[in-house]
Image (spheres, coloured by chain):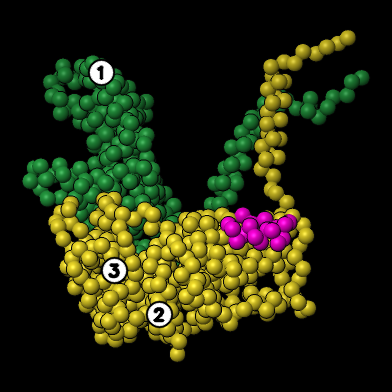
Chain colours: A green, B yellow
């Protein structure tokens, strides 16, 4: 009689599951080695003094105590990041929604315009930062030249501590193309019957926007808001290339300050503590937004409150 | 014969198993490199070098220096045919990070360039090998090196790297512009004994012309530059960055304020960062600017003007010239695979012949006292712009003195605090005195948590 091997004794479902895990094994290895592993390591390092080139030694909560009691740069970086978030996120969302609505019109050549508005968000990184350094040049920059045409003397944008953060906020609108495309997809998913019904009921354009468009688009806006909050706390490249946190500490973003501590001052333990505080802040903000969502996010199929 | 066809399902299963195994194999950790045992001082003369074929990795940050090291390394390989040398360059701003990553990853180079904050970081963490046993065992001519330069390469009483040069950071100027305006040059003022901050201000004002896009600036400016520029001026005026016992920062000192006030009052004659962006021949190299001596050779073919040098101007109060105490060197990181061979290369780079070869190619002042001020050496170098003046300045650096970079483990963070506060003063967002006081307080706080090697900062022949 033929012997039945252990493998052959397994059910088809179990065999399928095993092969499923084998197929996702590369991702699992990457996740544990490059994500979860470093996260756990940084958690333990946040309780140590660690200079990378020497062994970590345990100092308890000293890093966290210092952060909240004896580090003005930490508070400044938090202030800069939150100020950026308060202005850049809602204004960026509003602009991307406005452009999406314009691009949702049925006019000839609208696909060309959609591509044009989306392209800047594809170009990113150091090249864009360098470009904007020139745009903000107080003498030769296009922005001040344009302001000069209408009789306004532009500030020394990136060299003036009062204007440097505003310059970076303005620059953030360069990459609204990504949000615009998502808004556009959301707009195109709104049933036209709703607009027709609203028109029949006498709603004007503004009322149709507030009573139909916004509620139906709210899941998309919710997603863009969450992603905007997360991206803001990870803001780094532009500040690093264009201002390096200056003048003074006027553009010292949280992530940039974390980088300075880790890779310039070799305070990896303190940087790890900063990273975990950042994680908690993002978590709290994200959970708050989720908690608020039942009050303003409309999902078709969900029971009305 | 019973042949079984390979079903699609079995094929996919097999492919999954093979690819999973391949990923696991690729991700398998490499066997740990065998670390070289810590080198102890040979008790009976130098150890014989390996006869195995090896390649020594030599790390540095200045690309142009490779021009001088390559022929020297080639001669080293002629002498030791089994030992090749590979020079690996990393941009200065990233150098510390690369070294830190190499140490953390257990893949340190053999010969490591060291300078200023890179040195204090490595030395403060105990990562550099004590070279004293090698010096003693091989009878290295250590007495031919300036004590102040050796101090910059020592920590805790241990010699951790050997200087390969001693830079003074000279004051460059465009000769033609002075001739055009009928002005005496900084060099001439220096020889007269009248080259001070006040003279520099007078010249800067007279050399500045034009407005807007056409403005030409009379000097390079001072303020939030690198610390190599600022520290000697503090010493010239009787101040310093720290007191000699490293108990407090001296930026709040009235004498420090006088220096910064000088820089602040003369901003109008200096290009700002945006002016330097504009890419004109003036940007970054206006009438008078501070620069490293070897850069003269690097820049010479590219400069659209003739230039010469003078020392950085002296304080008008003290009339004391103080040079920069920069003395980059080469050391051996702990864990280097071939420490004995690395030492052999470092010693080779410091032979008199090698020093002259490097000087010929790069204009890098030799670190050894016996040849640094040798008139023949400077005269033989036909590439050096104004070699007679270069020789005078090299002698002056030894005779007048220089100010070393403070040896604190967190000097980078201290200088960042300095720049943050001073930049607000330069932008007229806070009074200069407040900026210096705030910078002083922040640096004092950082001093409390620093690891320090207490050694003289200001070195004079006395």
Q: Is residue A176 above or below residue B239?
A: above
Please rate how many residues cluster around mark 2, counting C-alpha atoms within 10 Å: few if below 14, some from 14 to 19, many from 20.
some
Q: Is residue A270 visible?
A: no
Task: Please identify the quadrant where the C terminus of chain B is shown.
Answer: bottom left
**SS class, disc 1:** loop
Chain-order first, disc 2 or disc 3: 3
Label 2: which secondary element:
helix
Cα–Cα span, label 1 and label 2? 73 Å
Magenta span has B72? yes
Spot occupied by residue A45 in the image (x, y as percentages of width and height): 54, 61
Q: Which mark is residue B153?
A: none
Same chain check for tags 2 and 3: yes
Image coords of residue A104 (percent x, y): 25, 22
Residue located beneath label 1 in the image = A109
> Chain ID for label 3?
B
Instruction: Give me the residue at 88% from left, 9% from top.
Output: B1
Report the chain holding disc 2.
B
Q: Which residues are magenta?
A: B70-86
Chain letter behind tag 1:
A
Depth check: give the residue in front, B430 or B244.
Answer: B244
Residue B307 position within the rendered picture, expressed as x and y whole percent measured from the top left: 32, 63
Discs 1, 2: same chain: no
Q: Seen in the image, is A252 located left or right of residue A197?
A: right
For this view, does A89 lie left or right of residue A60?
left
- The span from disc 2 to disc 3 (Cα, nearest Å) is 25 Å
How far across and how far down the image is residue A117, in percent?
Answer: 28, 30
Q: Is A85 placed left or right of A279 in the picture?
A: left
**Residue B396 shows which numbered tag?**
2
- As drawn, the label of residue B223 is 3
Which residue is located at x 75 percent, y 27 percent? Answer: A10
């Amino acid at each position: 009689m033929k012997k039945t091997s252990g493998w052959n004794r397994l059910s088809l479902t179990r065999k399928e599951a095993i092969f499923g895990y084998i197929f996702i094994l590369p991702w699992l290895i990457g996740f544990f080695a490059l994500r979860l592993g470093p996260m756990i390591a940084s958690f333990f390092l946040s309780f140590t003094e660690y200079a990378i080139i020497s062994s970590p030694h345990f100092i308890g909560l000293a890093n966290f105590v210092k952060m909240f009691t004896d580090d003005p740069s930490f508070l400044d970086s938090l202030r800069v990041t939150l100020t950026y978030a308060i202005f850049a996120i809602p204004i960026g969302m509003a602009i991307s929604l406005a452009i999406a609505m314009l691009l949702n019109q049925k006019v000839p050549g609208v696909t060309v315009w959609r591509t044009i508005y989306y392209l800047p968000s594809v170009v990113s990184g150091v090249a864009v930062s360098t470009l904007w350094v020139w745009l903000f040049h107080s003498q030769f920059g296009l922005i001040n030249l344009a302001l000069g045409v209408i009789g306004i003397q532009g500030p020394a944008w990136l060299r003036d501590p009062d204007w440097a953060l505003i310059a970076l906020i303005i620059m953030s609108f360069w990459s609204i193309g990504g949000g615009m495309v998502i808004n556009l997809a959301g707009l195109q998913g709104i049933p036209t019957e709703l607009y027709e019904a609203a028109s029949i009921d006498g709603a004007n354009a503004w009322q149709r926007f507030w009573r139909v468009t916004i509620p139906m688009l709210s899941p998309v806006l919710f997603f863009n808001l969450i992603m905007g909050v997360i991206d803001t706390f990870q803001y780094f490249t532009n500040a690093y290339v264009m201002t390096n946190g200056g003048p003074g500490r006027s553009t010292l973003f949280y992530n940039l300050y974390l980088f300075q501590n880790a890779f310039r001052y070799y305070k990896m333990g303190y940087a790890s503590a900063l990273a975990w505080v950042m994680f908690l802040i993002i978590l709290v903000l994200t959970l708050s937004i989720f908690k608020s969502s039942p009050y303003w996010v409309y999902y078709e199929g969900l029971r009305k409150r | 014969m019973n042949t079984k066809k390979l079903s699609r399902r079995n094929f996919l299963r097999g492919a999954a198993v093979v690819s999973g195994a391949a990923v696991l194999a690729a991700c398998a950790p490499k066997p740990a490199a065998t670390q070289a045992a810590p080198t102890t001082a040979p008790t009976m003369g130098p150890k014989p070098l390996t006869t195995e074929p090896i390649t020594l990795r030599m790390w540095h940050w200045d690309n142009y220096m490779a021009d001088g090291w390559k022929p020297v390394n080639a001669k080293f390989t002629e002498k030791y045919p089994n030992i090749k040398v590979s020079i690996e360059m990393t941009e200065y701003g990233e150098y510390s990070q690369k070294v830190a990553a190499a140490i953390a990853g257990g893949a340190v180079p053999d010969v490591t360039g060291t300078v200023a904050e890179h040195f204090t970081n490595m030395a403060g963490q105990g990562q550099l090998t004590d070279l004293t046993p090698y010096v003693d065992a091989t009878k290295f001519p250590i007495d031919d090196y300036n004590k102040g330069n050796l101090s910059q390469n020592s920590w805790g009483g241990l010699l951790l790297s050997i200087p390969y040069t001693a830079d003074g950071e000279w004051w460059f100027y465009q000769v033609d512009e002075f001739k055009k305006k009928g002005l005496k040059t900084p060099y001439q003022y220096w020889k007269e004994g009248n080259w001070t901050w006040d003279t520099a201000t007078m010249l800067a004002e007279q050399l500045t012309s034009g407005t807007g896009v056409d403005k030409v600036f009379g000097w390079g400016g001072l303020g939030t530059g690198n610390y190599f520029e600022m520290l000697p001026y503090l010493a010239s005026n009787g101040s310093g960055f720290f007191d000699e016992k490293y108990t407090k920062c001296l930026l709040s000192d009235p004498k420090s304020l006088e220096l910064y006030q000088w820089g602040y009052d003369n901003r109008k004659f200096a290009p700002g960062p945006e002016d330097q962006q504009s890419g004109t021949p003036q940007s970054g190299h206006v009438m008078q600017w501070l620069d490293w001596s070897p850069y003269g050779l690097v820049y010479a073919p590219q400069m659209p003007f003739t230039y010469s040098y003078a020392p950085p101007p002296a304080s008008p109060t003290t009339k004391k010239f103080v040079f920069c105490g920069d003395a980059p060197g080469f050391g051996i990181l702990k864990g280097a695979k071939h420490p004995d061979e690395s030492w052999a290369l470092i010693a080779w780079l410091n032979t008199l012949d090698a020093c002259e070869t490097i000087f010929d190619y790069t204009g890098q002042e030799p670190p050894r006292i016996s040849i640094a001020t040798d008139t023949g050496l400077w005269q033989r170098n036909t590439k050096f712009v104004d070699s007679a003046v270069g020789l005078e300045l090299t002698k002056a650096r030894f005779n007048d003195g220089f100010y070393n970079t403070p040896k604190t483990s967190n000097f980078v963070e201290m200088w960042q605090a300095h720049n943050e506060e001073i930049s607000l003063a330069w932008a007229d967002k806070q009074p200069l005195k407040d900026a210096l006081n705030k910078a002083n307080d922040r640096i004092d706080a950082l001093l409390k948590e620093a690891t320090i090697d207490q050694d003289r900062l200001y070195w004079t022949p006395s």
